[in-house]
Amino acid sequence: MQRRNFLQATLTLAGVALASRAGRTAPNLAKKTLKLRFRPYTLQLKHAFTLATSSRSTTPVMLTEVEYDGIVGYGEASMPPYLGESHQTVGDFLTRVDLSQFSDPFQLEDILTYVDGVAPGNPAAKAAVDIALHDLVGRLLGKPLHAIWGYDAAKTPLTSFTIGIDTPEVVRQKTREASAFRILKLKLGRGTDKEIVEAVRSVSKVPFGVDVNQGWKDRSQALDSIYWLQEQGCVMIEQPMDKANLDDLAWLTEKSPLPIVGDEGVQRLPDVRKAMGVYSGINVKLMKCTGLREAHKMLNTARALGMKTMIGCMTETSCAISAASQLATIVEWADLDGALLISNDVFRGMTVVDGRVTLSATPGIGVTPI
Amino acid sequence: MQRRNFLQATLTLAGVALASRAGRTAPNLAKKTLKLRFRPYTLQLKHAFTLATSSRSTTPVMLTEVEYDGIVGYGEASMPPYLGESHQTVGDFLTRVDLSQFSDPFQLEDILTYVDGVAPGNPAAKAAVDIALHDLVGRLLGKPLHAIWGYDAAKTPLTSFTIGIDTPEVVRQKTREASAFRILKLKLGRGTDKEIVEAVRSVSKVPFGVDVNQGWKDRSQALDSIYWLQEQGCVMIEQPMDKANLDDLAWLTEKSPLPIVGDEGVQRLPDVRKAMGVYSGINVKLMKCTGLREAHKMLNTARALGMKTMIGCMTETSCAISAASQLATIVEWADLDGALLISNDVFRGMTVVDGRVTLSATPGIGVTPI
């Protein structure tokens, strides 16, 4: 209690918060424990980013570090405003996380169960701890996580590049700039779907997925749109209708010639079971699901249930993107362009080579701070 | 082709088969590859082992080794005769497995997908490769698998000790010998259920599960038996009826006051999805499901689907038992007594302390050859 007050009084979101009590109340200096640090950062977007319901030019993130025995693992929370987390909420949550009670970083199940129980919600804040812990464990083992998990770095998929909703002229410009990508993801759902697709098609022939962000309201019109999109070279449809509208989504999934992937409707592990019959696939994002450990379980569960899998992202630095890319070999579709959309990245890590997710051979999540 | 013929001509099941072609057709000595060796062994059972449909006093096993860069991982296939594998079939299968094509032991997904595709069936033979590879990877990382997977060795469950079908006198004797265990597993299903349970209860008060091995034929009688067993301190029912009788199993699962766990009815990962609604839990065994990688996926999938989980075994040395015990922290029930039933173990590994699965801190699956 005293410690909590001390930390809350001395913490500042502009600085670095040391959440360990080593040296204060734990005089046993021989016992190594985990130390959590975090600091807020603001990503500058290269282009204003438009969804069905909002538009913005920055994204707040929280950069985290977990240190053990002199080794540091890096993590990140990304907080696009429409998801409800912020510098303030993530800082408040992380202040309550006491990792100094743990002396073995390998006990991820226990540690992350504890973190998840600190407060409900806060998935991005939880992911920031999860990613840093995974990076730390990989560094302690001297291996990248994809190797520790038994995956072949050569088998990564292409990543899509996202084209936000905008005027045909800007869409054409963005599509031209994305000419290095071999698959695109088009944001639709604001009544300008055909104009956007036609603008893209006027300058590019690559396949594309679409993300409707719950924007379509009528299932029959949605099905008509899907048939038209298929003719244009579309390969998948993400969250076509309201996530609460399970009947229409199930109807659409049954009738659709293209896979229907749940995004807003599939947040955490228990949602995978509920997605059966509603969607034909799931889009897993670290910031929705509390991090790599739960993401890995979600993807393997979906595969075991015969569902298609996708891994996505928010606008994030190469830290969280490189973490997500460790799971890229077990998905049909990767949408890991988040770090490419920002102008002030602070990590080197995963790269996109010839449109493909290309993993770093560095231990852990494979990142180096810039 | 030439190599296959060479190996098949020179292999002898009584000796050690070196399945690598290093030095024969691959003169690039700088490239490290995987080498698979195997040799047959016969386990001597302390007591003849009686199931609903058979009785025996030995179990054939195949001991395997996978070597990479001078490090050796150990594995094992156990072949109780009623499952259809034998020294001959496992030897034939392993002779066809060419691990020398792989130069990175960490690519478990690729290697085990290849092994699974060498021939259909042969789950124990496949497990023998999977276990040795996992042991190798753990040794290369210098950590036990349970730590690499993020599990806390302190959170292992009790293991049950199995009492086979026999006369009340022998059942009493076996139960007395099992007094160190805090949970028992009783084999039932041959029409002598009450005598067996009463014999156990005359000398022991510990809780027990029962394994009916598909022995019950009428669902209403089965439900009556379950209510009676619950009064006697029974905590779960394994495979009460024919695995093909899905309707009766689903009916029983719905009505039963005790969890109904599928064993013969749940072999591999795709069976977990099919088990929903038919069973309330699954019993995963490495020798049914091709090894640790698939077992881990099955257990996590079952948990994500809200099902109960159990890990079981055949009569096995401490090699395969120690491998299975790496997953013991994510199950409700462990039945890992296989190595305790034999008189000629060839490994030290997992131990049972005060009735509890107790993991070795040794890297990999935690075994040392005796």
Image (cartoon, coloured by chain):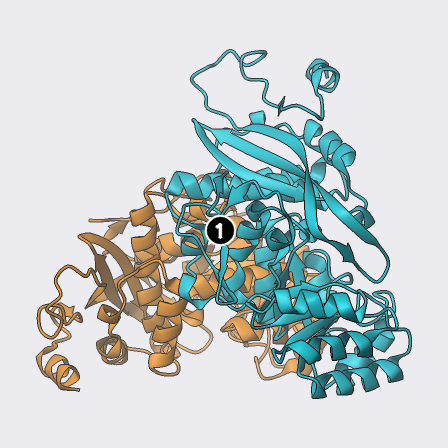
Chain colours: A cyan, B orange
The kind of secondary structure element at disc 1 is helix
Q: Where does the image place residue B198, in percent across and percent down from the top left?
A: 56, 58
Q: Which of B173 and A62 is in front in this view?
A: A62
Q: Which residue corresponds to the image point at 76% horizontal and 87% vertical from the top-left?
A: A227
Residue B345 visible in the displayed image: no
Tell me the residue that label 1 is attached to. Answer: B328
Residue A83 visible in the displayed image: yes
A259 shown above or below A48: below
Q: Where does the image place residue A14, in percent across and percent down from the top left?
A: 70, 25
Query: Considering the image in quadrants, where does the N terminus of chain A appear?
Result: top right
Residue B274 occupies quadrant = bottom right
Q: Which of B142 and A370 is in front in this view?
A: A370
Residue B291 occupies quadrant = bottom left
Counting labels gives: 1
Q: Which of B36 and B370 is in front in this view?
A: B36
Q: Which residue corresponds to the image point at 12% horizontal and 77% vertical from the top-left?
A: B11
Q: Where does the image place residue A103, in percent across and percent down from the top left?
A: 49, 28
**Left/right of residue A39 with respect to residue B189 in the rendered view:** right
Residue A240 occupies quadrant = bottom right
Q: Which residue corresponds to the image point at 81% horizontal and 67% vertical from the top-left?
A: A167
Tell me the crowding category of disc 1: few under 14, some 14 to 19, or many 20 or more residues within 10 angstroms, Cα based.
many
B296 shown above or below A96: below
Q: Which chain carries label 1?
A: B
**Left/right of residue B299 with respect to residue B9 in the rendered view:** right
Q: Nearer the viewer, residue B137 or A65?
A: A65
Q: Which residue corresponds to the image point at 61% horizontal and 68% vertical from the top-left?
A: A309
